[in-house]
Image (tube, grey):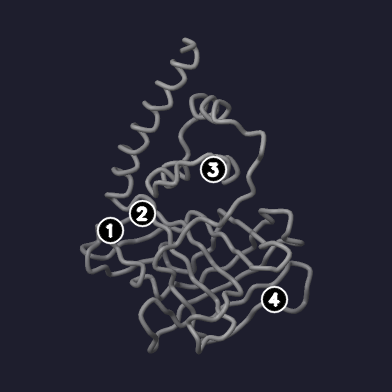
């Protein structure tokens, strides 16, 4: 085997091993957690089409007994469309609480359940276009409501409006939506000419982003997802 290829292979193996180890540590203390809410076409039918998906990337910022104060590090918004999903992202989520954190009393703070994230505080702001299908930035707001709902569901108010449009794409008060029990990062377009060697070079040359740790922890170490990671920032 060519010495250069052998060295590259050993480097990749070492990196993957290190990433798996570090990712396990990351998730053990709730450093990163993904939650997703589904806005449904028919709120009375949990199997109806999703018209908007809100994906929140959280990290534990504080803890008081069984209560965890979650920081919203980023929000993604996906609008399924026949011509290709629209995608927006923001890393400046305005959480309307006294300390800017989303506090939740967990049954097991070290093993939070997605169903426990069913009462989000008011979150609002503007999300930037994150793929070419989205025509304009997105103005959004959502807030959980108390009340009866089923397992993996929530009651919430929401509004999703394109920046320069007077009417919202979707808007409802006290609606029933879904809490995704297995949330994933939204799909990202794959760059055909991104090679594994190029990715390895970038990893070595720059700090390891948290998104890569999440992809590794979720066992999605594939060529396509490596390309997806390159586009997450």
Work out whether mark 2 precedes mark 4 in sequence or the reverse, and give the earlier one: 2
Q: Foreground residue, 114 or 47?
A: 47
Residue at 67 percent of width and 56 percent of height: 128
Residue in the foreground of this view, choosing between 69 and 6: 6
Give the SS element for disc 1: strand
Q: Which residue is mark 3?
A: 229
Residue assigned mark 1:
63
Of residues 195 and 164, which is closer to you in this image?
A: 195
Name the residue located 28 percent from the left edge and 50 percent from the top edge. 29
**Left or right of 167: which side holds 190?**
left
> Which residue lies under the disc numbered 4?
169
Mark 4 burial class by Cα count in 10 Å: few <14, some 14-19, many 20+: some
Contact, mark 1 vs mark 2 (Cβ under 8 Å): no
Q: Which residue position holds label 2?
A: 61
Q: Label 2: few (<14), some or many (≥20) within 10 Å?
A: some
How far is the residue under mark 3 from the one under mark 4? 29 Å
The picture places residue 117, in percent across and down from the top left corner, at: 38, 70
For numbered disc 2, what is the local secondary structure? strand
Q: Residue furthest front?
A: 1
State how far apart marks 2 and 4 are (Cα): 33 Å
Contact? badges 3 and 4 (CB < 8 Å): no
Q: Position of residue 107 (x, y in %)?
A: 22, 69
Mark 1 and mark 4: Cα distance apart in space: 37 Å
The earlier-in-sequence mark between 3 and 2 is 2
Task: Tell us which disc is closer to us: 3 or 2.
Answer: 3
Distance of mark 1 from mark 2, alpha carbons?
Answer: 7 Å
Q: Quadrant of residue 233?
A: top right
> Which of pointers 3 and 4 lies earlier in the amino acid sequence?
4
| Badge nearest the viewer, 3 or 4 | 3
Quote the CA–CA distance across marks 3 and 2.
24 Å
Asked if residue 169 is positioned above or below residue 13 in the image, the reply reads below
């Amino acid at each position: 085997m060519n010495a250069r290829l052998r060295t590259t292979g050993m480097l990749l193996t070492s990196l993957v091993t290190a990433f798996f180890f570090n990712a396990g540590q990351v998730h053990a203390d709730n450093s990163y957690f993904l939650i997703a809410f589904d806005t449904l076409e028919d709120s009375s039918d949990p199997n109806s089409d999703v018209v908007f998906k809100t994906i929140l990337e959280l990290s534990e910022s504080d803890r008081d007994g069984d209560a965890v104060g979650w920081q919203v590090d980023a929000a993604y918004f996906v609008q399924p469309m026949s011509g290709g999903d629209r995608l927006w992202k923001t890393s400046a989520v305005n959480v309307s609480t006294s300390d800017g954190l989303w506090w939740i009393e967990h049954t097991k703070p070290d093993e939070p359940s997605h169903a426990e994230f069913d009462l989000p505080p008011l979150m609002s702001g503007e999300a930037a276009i994150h793929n070419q299908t989205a025509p304009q930035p997105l103005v959004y707001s959502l807030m959980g409501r108390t009340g009866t709902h089923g397992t993996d569901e929530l009651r919430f108010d929401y509004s999703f409006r394109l920046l320069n449009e007077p009417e919202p794409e979707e808007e409802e008060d006290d609606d029933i939506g879904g809490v995704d029990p297995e949330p994933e990062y939204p799909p990202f377009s794959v760059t055909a000419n991104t090679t594994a060697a190029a990715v390895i070079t970038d990893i070595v040359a720059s700090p390891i982003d948290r998104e890569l740790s999440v992809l590794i922890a979720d066992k999605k170490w594939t060529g396509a997802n490596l390309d997806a990671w390159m586009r997450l920032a």
